[in-house]
Amino acid sequence: MARKQYQTKNRCVKTWGIYAAFVVVALSVLSADGAFNVRDFGAKGDGVVKDTAAVQNAIDAASAAGGGEVLLPRGIYLCGSVFLKSGVDFHLAEGATLKGSPDSVDYNAVDVCPQNWGQPGTGDNISGAHLLLCIEQNNVTLRGPGKIDGNVGAFLKMPDGSHPPHKLKIPWRPGQMVWFVESRKISIRDIEIADAPYWSCFIYGCEDVIVENASIHTVREPHTYNGDGLDIDSSRRVRVTGCNISTADDAITLRAAGQGRLKKDGPCSDVAVSNCTFSSDCNAIRLGVGNGAIRNCSFRDIKVKNTRYAVNAVGSWSLPEHGVDISCVSFENLEIDAKGFCKFYYKYATGSVFEEISFRHVRGKVREPSIFDDTPERPFRNLRFEDVRIAGETSPRVSDNQGERK
């Protein structure tokens, strides 16, 4: 027993010695301004050499030192999957681009963590690979003014170079490009997130998140299948402000699909979106997907332009299931230029209930009437409109189930 204790103690001393040495090395490569400059770790930034290892080593060094700024100076850093860690301020300087590698071998495997998923050739046809990952970390900043570029042109094409006629024809593509999962105290600000081959930025099961002054856009012609902007799922206390999002698919979504994947599931709640501009080939604002709850959320001072529907709420998009319960969601001070104002429907949901959804001070123009399609068993409850003046909005197309709608 004495020998075992000695060996264990010796291994601990040895491990601590290695860790301490790594911290010393990490501190030794701090630049004059106190940042961990990726070029000091071997990054070329020429858009040709793969810089994944150098960027990751800079992040690891900052984390080992207790946190700090990881700086990407001007240049194009071609990378596969990069993992953010607690305490890291990941700073893309002006003129800096983190660009997704075109090679699938440079990305994480689908089993990188229990919360991940992906299955090429089915559904949305994604691999579960991501460019920038933050898994169960705390106090992480992602900021610009540089750019994250998903390199969509490397993935959404057939072997002959043509655009796929359908998403299931895509040979291979990553999933959500920027992926924060079950992390806390996250700040994303002053950054451009561009040309993702799938969703651009996914906030999944996170708490205390700020997304500020971000420019997010996906290629609309040719169409980026599932090219969402900002997706917020089963997350709490999220603030989105000053963002400009233009996408091929939904610009911003609130979802509640954490069941069975998240270690600690919960509602998508206390999400406040303000002073943003949204544009989409699909929906500017989308509520729904999952079997949880979306509640206590607000959208204020929003501009919607060049969009199919300004606001879309759906109980279940593709499967017969209970669906999402949506309650206490408010919209105030909206300017709209869209094909349609609202489309609310349960679709495949067998148990969803929409209630306490309000619109105040809405102006704009549309070309088609809104759609409100509930059921006799589950009428929309307390759906309220106050001072809503939209040119082209005739009497909305509604079901016969007036229920408690006001």
Image (cartoon, rainbow, N blue to C red):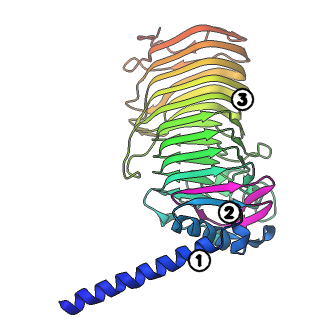
Q: Which residue is mark 2?
A: 171
The quadrant in which the N terminus is found is bottom left
**Which one is nearer the viewer's eye here, 61 or 152?**
61
User: Along the horizontal axis of the image, is 125 left or right of 353?
Assistant: right
Tag 2 or tag 3, which sits nearer the N-term?
2
Is residue 126 visible in the rendered image? The answer is no
Tag 3 or tag 1, which sits nearer the N-term?
1
**Marks 1,3: beta carbons within 8 A:** no
Range drawn in magenta = 73-99
Q: Classify mark 1: helix, strand or loop.
A: helix
* x, y percent for residue 267: 41, 37
Q: Which residue is mark 1?
A: 25
Mark 1: which amino acid? Val
In whole angstroms, how far apart are the C-alphas of marks 3 and 2? 29 Å
In whole angstroms, how far apart are the C-alphas of marks 1 and 3? 52 Å
Residue 213 part of the magenta segment: no
Residue 81 part of the magenta segment: yes
User: Outermost residue toward the bottom?
Assistant: 3
Decide: is 234 above or below 374.
below
Q: Classify mark 3: helix, strand or loop.
A: strand
The residue positioned 61% from the left and 30% from the top of the image is 285
Q: Which mark is residue 219?
A: none
* x, y percent for residue 214: 69, 41
Q: Which residue is mark 3?
A: 307
* x, y percent for residue 76: 79, 62
Decide: is 93 above or below 210.
below
User: Outermost residue toward the front?
Assistant: 32
Mark 2: which amino acid? Pro
